[in-house]
Structure formats: C-alpha cells, structure tokens
Image (cartoon, helix red, strand yellow):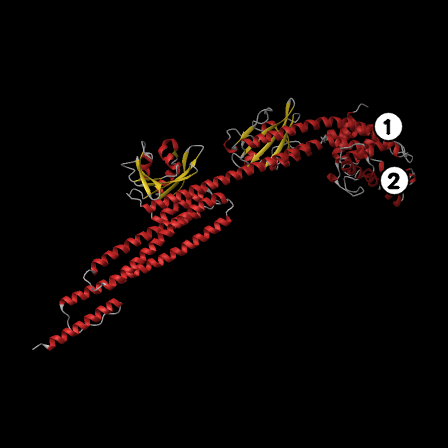
Amino acid sequence: MPDYDVIRDFLVQFHWISQTVEAILKGEPVPPATGQPPSQVGKLISSMLSLSERYKSLEGKINDYKRKQQAQEVALKNMTAQLDIEKKASSNAALLEANLKRAERRIDDLISTNQALKGHIMELSKQLMSSQQDLASSEIHARSEALRQNAEGAAEQLRNETQALVSILKTVQLMDTILSPEEVVKRACQIPLDCFGCQRSAAFLWEEDSASFIPVHSLGMKASLISAFGASRLRGMDLPVLTELLAKGSTLVIENCWKTPTKGKVYVGDGRMESFESPFPFLPKEYIEQFEIYSLLAVSFASRGKVLGVLFVDYGNTPHEFSETEITAMNGLGQFVGTSLDNIQRQQAATQRLLKLERLTETGSVLRDIEAAISSIYQPEPMIGMVIGMVPRVIACDWVSVLLRDKPAGGFYVLGKLDDLSDLVYGKGTIPFDYVNGAADLQADRVLHRANLETESRTSALDLYLVSHGIRSDVYVPIPIPGEVIGLLHLCSRRVAGFVQEDITLAQDIARRLGDGLQKTMAQRVQDRRRTNDHFKEMQTLIDNLSQKDFTLGDYRDRMIAHGLEVARRLHLDEELQGWIRYAVVLQEIGKNAIPEYILNKREKLTAKELAILRSHPTKGAEMIKNFRFSQLIKGLKFTKFVTPLIRHLYERWDGTGYPEGLKGEAIPIGSRIVAVVNAYAAMTTGRPYRQALSQQQALREIQEAAGTQFDPRVVASFLQLQNQKPS
C-alpha cells in the first residue's frame, strides 16, 4: 500500500519548484519553500537564482550600452549640425570644405560602426531572451558565460569607439583659423591626455630658417625637466628619417626607445601598420635618456607634403602598447592639426602681403605729399614740420626730429619732438655737437642705427636723455645737399630693435627729398632777401607819397633804422625779427595820416579830446597796414602778422601807463620797445612847429632818465652804449 504522506510531500515540493522556476523566468520574487526540499533540488534552485542575478546584471549593462548609444547618436547629430554651421560660416571655403569632408567621412565610418554595434546589441538581446527560455536546461551556465564575455567585448569596443569619437570632435574644434599656431598646438597636446589617459605630450613646430623643431608646449612633464624641454631644439639634419616620415604625414610608433631606437611601426591608413627600420635612431640617445622615454607615439603635423610640426605622446618610463584606436585617432588628430596650421600660415601670409601692399600704397602717398610740401613751402621750418608729421604714417616710431647743423653755434638746431631740452641746449634750441654720440660726423652715405641704447658702451648726454625718457633704439639718417650734410633725420622708438632695414631705407629716401627741398629753400631765401631789399626801398617811396604831412622824420630815418638794427643785434635777436623792426621804423608814423593836421601842428596844449585823437594813431596805423595791400609788394613774408603789433604797441610804457592797451614790461613786443627808444631820440633831436630840437646829449639824458618808467632799461642801456661808442 502506497505511502500517501510521502506522495503528498513530493507533490507539494514539485508544486513549489514549478512556482520557483516560473517566478525566476518572469523576474518575480521566489516564493517561500514549503518543507525541506531534497538536496539536489536545493542546489538546482540556488544555481537558478545565481544565474538569474547574473542575467539581471547583464540586462542592466545592455541597457546602459543602449543609453550610451543614444547619447552617442545625439552627439553625432550635434557634430553634424556644427559642421553645417562651419560650412556656412567659413570664409576659406575651398580649404575648409576639404577638411570637413574628411571629418564627414570619419563620422560616416563611426555611424556605420555604431550601426553595426547597434545590431550587435540587438543580437545580444535576442541571445538573452533565448537564454531566459533555456534557463532551466543543463547548458545554461555555459551559455551565460559566453554571453557575458560577448557583452564585455562589446562594451570594450564601444568604449574605444567613444574615445575615438571624442578625440575627433575635439580635433574638429581645432580647425578655427582665428587661433594662433601656438594655441592650436596647446589644444592638441591636451587631447591624448584627456581621451586615452596618456601620461605626457610634447609639441614642436618646424622652423624653416633654422631647419629645426622648436619646442612649443608640453603637458605632464616633471618640473625639473620643463626648462630642459624649452631648450631642446631638434635639428632636422640630426633626424633625417624622422623628418622624412613626418613630412609624409606618417604617424610613427616606437615600442622600445631603449633597446630598439631604430625600429618602429608606421601607420599607413585604414588601421594598418607596417614595420619600419631606420639606419639611424629616430631620436637622439641623449634626448631619450634625459626625458626617460620608453614607448613613444610620434604624430606628424603635415600638409601638402611639408612638415609643420610633431606631437610626441608617451607614458613616461613605462612600456605601453598603443592600441589601434589610439593610433588611428592620433593620426587623424595630426592630419587635422597639420591642415589647420597650414590654413593659419596661408592666412598670415595673405595678411602680410596685404599689409605690405597697404604700406607701399601709404608710402607712395606720403612721398607724394612730401614732394608737394617741398614744392609749395619756401620756409624751412614749416617744410621740416610738415615732413616730421608725415614720417610716423609710414615708419613706426615714437619720436621724430630734425637736427640742422649750426656751425657758428657749434651744434645742432633741433626741430621736432625731443620734449624739454633745457638741460641740453643753449641759445635757441641748439645741442652741442659733442652731445650727439657718433652722429655729428656722419657722411651722406652712412647711417647710425642703434638697436639698444641701454647696452651702448659709450653714451653721450643726449643718449642718457633719450634712455631716461624711455627710448630704447634710434636711427640717425643724414640729410644731404650737394657737397655736405646739412642735418640729420632722427627717429626714436621705445622698443628694442624698433627699426628694420626697410624702415631705414625709407628714412633715407625721405631725408634725401628733404635735403632737395632745403637746398631749394636756401636758394629761394637768397632771392627773397634781394627782393625784400628792393621792396623795402619801394615801401619807403610809398610811405613818402602817402601823405604830405611831416611825419617822415626827414634825414633821421636811415639813422633810426641803423640804430634799431644795431640794438636788435646787441640783444641777440634773430635775423627775421630784425627785418620786422626795420619795417616798423619806416611805418611807425603811418597812423598820423588819419589825424587832423591842426592837431599835429597845434602849438598850444591839446585838449583831452584832441589828445585822445592823437593817441589813436598807433591803432589807426595798425589798421591801415592790414587794409593796405603791402603783401603784394612783399609776397611770401608774414608782413601783417609781425609788423602790425610792433606799430600798435609803439607807445606802450615799461611801467604800464602807456597806450593803447596799457601793456607792461616784457608783455610789450621787443620790437616795439626798440623802436620806441630810437623814435624818441629822433623826435627829440628833430625840430617841430611847436618846439625846438634838443641837443644829442640832452636827448640821451632824457632817455636815460626815462629808463624803467617809459623805456625798457635793457634797450636803453644798449642804445646808450651804442651812442657812446660813436665818434663825437
């Protein structure tokens, strides 16, 4: 008879096992056990629970991969949109379009890879579902292990592809040609450290003049090696094989720089590497030892068959096997950086050509303006001032001045910008020859160019003055005329080596043109002096004919002119002012043409009204000079500007009690003060209808007594000294 209790327990256990299997397959909680299941059943259930947990974990990883794939697709869309924007915004369409096509092809490859990866993930999902169905079978453990390995491999592939994609995205950002080459290289150095966890990167740019790789930037370098890196120029002649490979755009991998410095692998494209052996080490042995390099990746910056630089990537003194993903991504990085550097160089070259063209155009315009100024201005100071103002338009400089030789004074007469020269000059802006170190003896075919005044072994007073005002370099260019150097064109800069040969050549051209103009001005001055003498005689005749009133002072006019000019010379007044004084002596009484004759000849004391009318003659004389067209007789002289104030202020007094404006002391024009003394002397020694003439001694005594009140004491002293030296 059967044991019903045993059968009942077995059925209960079987029912619990069925519920447990069903719950595991559905992912639901396992129901509690009823009674104590057999040991084999318990082991089976534990195995099933363990597998269930593993598959849940695997399913979670696959979901993570799907999320990463979605994020990757969003990134791809963003990059595609960014590339479209770059296409529309780029001004250099031809070059940039080619680079963008490369990036698009790379993106298409990545999209294809991700599509394949997506299919692979779908296949894994199917396998997971199949594995869930076969969970209760005896082969479940082997199938789950294979599935786990496939999932881990897919995750590793996805991670590598994601790193490559990030690297490409960052590389595309380097194609902004607004950046400088140094900034592009700095960004390139950061990518291998961020994307692949490399320990160090070091970038060099190729310098054509020295045929060397010049260090630009490094990351991950020990502090003790940074200065050594900055001085580590790599000459192309010492690295012939490496330079040749880099010029071809090849990426080189050296697995062991210590044992096999002549063996490496060269990336040839499409993920393929070829072994390469050089007859010489790729890098100098001392460089490898100094920077402790073991495994090295040399990424070429090249474009159009020309090497532009190189990026070295390594893990320090640690062996490392560079993966295919690392090599492929870094090779793409080198191509993009090379293209970017080439674009920048082309734009810089185009900008330099444009600037050169603009400078040539501006130079031509300035030279034409100088020629126009020389042909239209006959006074040296205005001409020189015009040229000084034009020089900074074509030559970058901070100060411009012209130093004209003044042989009688033993120095240079300075025109232009030299600030306050009170400690250096004497007389009227004259610097002694020995204050100008090395420039005083310049010949017409020589130029004195000093790139750094602070390092000059010999410094003159002017040099010390220039340095104290921030000048660091200067150029002295001779201003030639036939047979001699008439002066120097002096250019100063606050920068060390502020002038290049092109600047000096242009300065020589300007100095030559200025010399031609000054030569014409000197010849014109001789003609003007002769013409002025003739015009002066015409002026005297004209004044005599303007009125029949007795204001010409008769025979004393010539003596007054002689006395006035001699006093002016004794007071060291310049030649031009002496000429104006000469005219003032002739025209001093011209205003009396507007005064009624009865007032001029009245013997009795004048009334207040009559005195006011008489005292108006200096003002009326100044107005007559403005209205009469004397400038037609003496064309080219600033007659009205200089002579009018001398006539107007002839009757001002030293103590301020004169008329018409009551000027006092030095405020009275010096020419008026001189003419006032000689005029008073002539008037006192000449008879009038209302009084007799004074003797010479009486007149001199009157003038001496009026010194300090009516007359300038210095002018009186000079006049008395002149009269006392004359033979009696």
Task: Decide which of tag 1 and tag 2 comes sooner along the chain.
Answer: 1
Q: How far, Cα to Cα, is label 1 from label 2? A: 23 Å
Residue 354 visible (yes or no): yes
User: Considering the image in quadrants, where does the N terminus appear?
Assistant: bottom left
The mark found on residue 555 in the picture is 1
Judge from the rendering whether residue 627 lies leftward or rightward of residue 140; answer left or right.
Answer: right
Residue at screen point 51% across, 30% down: 456
x then y, percent, for residue 181: 45, 42
Judge from the rendering whether residue 722 lies leftward or rightward of residue 25; answer left or right.
Answer: right
Q: Which residue is mark 2?
A: 594
Callout 2 environment at 10 Å: few (<14), some (14 to 19), or many (20+)?
A: some
x then y, percent, for residue 529: 76, 27
Q: Nearer the viewer, residue 17 or 429?
A: 17
The mark found on residue 574 in the picture is none
Judge from the rendering whether residue 572 lies leftward or rightward of residue 123; answer left or right.
Answer: right
Residue 680 visible (yes or no): no
Which corner quadrant of the image does residue 603 belong to? top right
Q: Nearer the viewer, residue 538 or 372?
A: 372
- Disc 2 residue type? Ala
Q: Is residue 14 above or below residue 280?
A: below
